């Protein structure tokens, strides 16, 4: 009799666990990516999902943008391919200082 009472409780706990571990973080990440895509402006330094650093030189209609990756080298990418905005502070924080060899 007790297992019949506990089964619905276990199912509810399992569904809640799936929601809080799987679905909710994914929704939050999707919302952040939409906000990033909407906030892209000319002159923003960005990093693409494939690791290409560049500066946005033009935001086009249709969800694409022109990215300047070097002097006189522009590429057209999808706005969804932008992983994050690159800033000097975040790039410097990722570099680990190593002690000088004596």
Image (cartoon, rainbow, N blue to C red):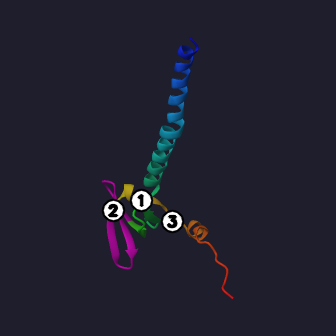
User: What quarter of the picture does the C terminus occupy?
Assistant: bottom right
User: Which label's residue is closer to the chain start, 2 or 1?
Assistant: 2
Residue 74, relative to residue 22: is it above or below?
Answer: below
Residue 65, relative to residue 98: is it above or below?
Answer: above
Q: Is residue 25 left or right of residue 54?
A: right
Give the structural element (helix, strand or loop) at label 2. strand
Q: Quadrant of residue 67?
A: bottom left
Give the structural element (helix, strand or loop) at label 3. loop
Query: Disc 1 and disc 3: Cα gap in Å?
Result: 10 Å
Q: Nearer the viewer, residue 49 or 67?
A: 49
Q: Is residue 62 left or right of residue 7?
A: left
Residue on which the image places disc 1: 82
Q: Residue at x 56, y 21 (%)?
A: 9
Q: Residue at x 46, y 65 (%)?
A: 46
Residue on which the image places disc 2: 77
Residue on which the image places disc 3: 86
**How would you rate the neighbour count of disc 2 (Cα within 10 Å): few for under 14, some for 14-19, many for 20 or more?**
some
Q: Quadrant of residue 56?
A: bottom left
Q: Which mark is residue 39?
A: none
Which residue ends up furthest to the top in the rendered image? 1
Q: Residue at x 58, y 14 (%)?
A: 2
Query: Disc 2 and disc 1: Cα gap in Å?
Result: 8 Å
Q: Main secondary structure of the magenta part?
A: strand
**How would you rate the neighbour count of disc 3 (Cα within 10 Å): few for under 14, some for 14-19, many for 20 or more?**
some
Question: Does the segment drawn in magenta span residue 68?
Answer: yes
Q: Are marks 3 and 2 in contact (CB under 8 Å)?
A: no
Q: Quadrant of residue 53?
A: bottom left
Q: Residue at x 49, y 40 (%)?
A: 22
Which residue ends up furthest to the right in the rendered image? 102
**How would you rate the neighbour count of disc 1 (Cα within 10 Å): few for under 14, some for 14-19, many for 20 or more?**
many
What segment is highlighted magenta in the picture? 58-76
């Amino acid at each position: 009799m007790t297992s019949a009472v506990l089964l619905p409780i276990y199912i509810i706990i399992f569904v809640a666990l799936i929601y809080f571990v799987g679905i909710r973080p994914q929704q939050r990440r999707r919302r952040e990516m939409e906000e990033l895509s909407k906030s892209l402006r000319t002159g923003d330094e960005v990093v693409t999902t494939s690791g290409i650093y560049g500066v946005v030189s033009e935001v086009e209609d249709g969800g694409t943008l022109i990215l300047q990756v070097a002097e006189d080298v522009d590429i057209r990418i999808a706005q969804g391919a932008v992983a994050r905005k690159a800033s000097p502070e975040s790039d410097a924080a990722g570099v680990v200082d190593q002690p000088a060899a004596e």
